[in-house]
Image (cartoon, grey):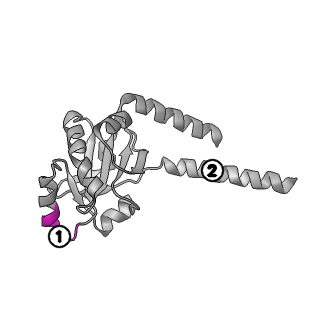
Amino acid sequence: MQIDYFTRALRAAAVVTALCAAGAAHAFDITDTQGHRHRLADYQGRYVVLNFWATWCVPCIQEIPEIAKFRREHADVVVIGVALDAEDADKVKRFAAKVGHDYPLVLADERVEKQLGAQRALPTTRIYDPKGKVAYDKPGRVDAKLLEEKTAPHAVRAQRSFQAFRTRLG
């Protein structure tokens, strides 16, 4: 009987730990192709969208114009593209311009990957809330509508509700 209780307690603790880790932010300090520095700490109070892509990834290329449109319509949201196939920087920059990538572009290298983590699938979009917590981190194509939903003021309220729920659990 005591073993069952102990096992259930351990499992519950593991679930709470996983939930807490899911909201933890990956602090970053990265530099784009124009030489501008981007630090998560500098964007407190604003949503930050990181979009991971590659030139060979068809869904990535298809979503870039939507992300660019979202950025133009939502100047209060920081949008940064992270190209994972950065062996030929000039080629990637030319390609990005050709497909409408008009927001800051970071070329991934070991330093960037160490800070942002390795991506298992492309495209992947990570959104940080105004407090710097990860609010969304999923592979798959995004569009302007999804980005609007995830960065709207009601999304902050939903994130607070989730944080309160986690607090009650542990």
Picture residue at 24% right of the left edge, 38% below the top: 70
| Residue 26 found in image quarter | bottom left
Residue 34, position as x, y percentages in the image:
14, 56
Q: Which residue is mark 2?
A: 15
Query: Is residue 85 on the magenta stretch?
Result: no
Residue closest to the far right:
1
| Residue 152 found in image quarter | top left
User: Looking at the image, can residue 169 be seen?
Assistant: yes
Q: Amino acid at mark 1?
A: Asp
Q: Bin the neighbour count of mark 1 within 10 Å (Cα to Cα): few under 14, some 14-19, many 20 and up.
A: few
User: Looking at the image, can residue 46 be seen?
Assistant: no
* Label whose residue precedes the other's in the sequence (2 or 1): 2
| Residue 85 found in image quarter | bottom left
Picture residue at 56% right of the left edge, 35% below the top: 164
Picture residue at 25% right of the left edge, 63% below the top: 56
Magenta-tinted stretch: 86-92
Q: Which residue is mark 1?
A: 88
Picture residue at 38% right of the left edge, 59% below the top: 121
Residue 123, position as x, y percentages in the image:
33, 55
Q: Amino acid at mark 2?
A: Val
Q: Secondary structure at mark 1?
A: loop
Image quarter in which the C terminus is found: top right
Residue 62 or residue 39, whichever sits in front:
62
In the rendering, which numbered label is found on residue 169?
Answer: none
Q: Please give left or right for residue 15 compared with residue 41 in the image.
A: right
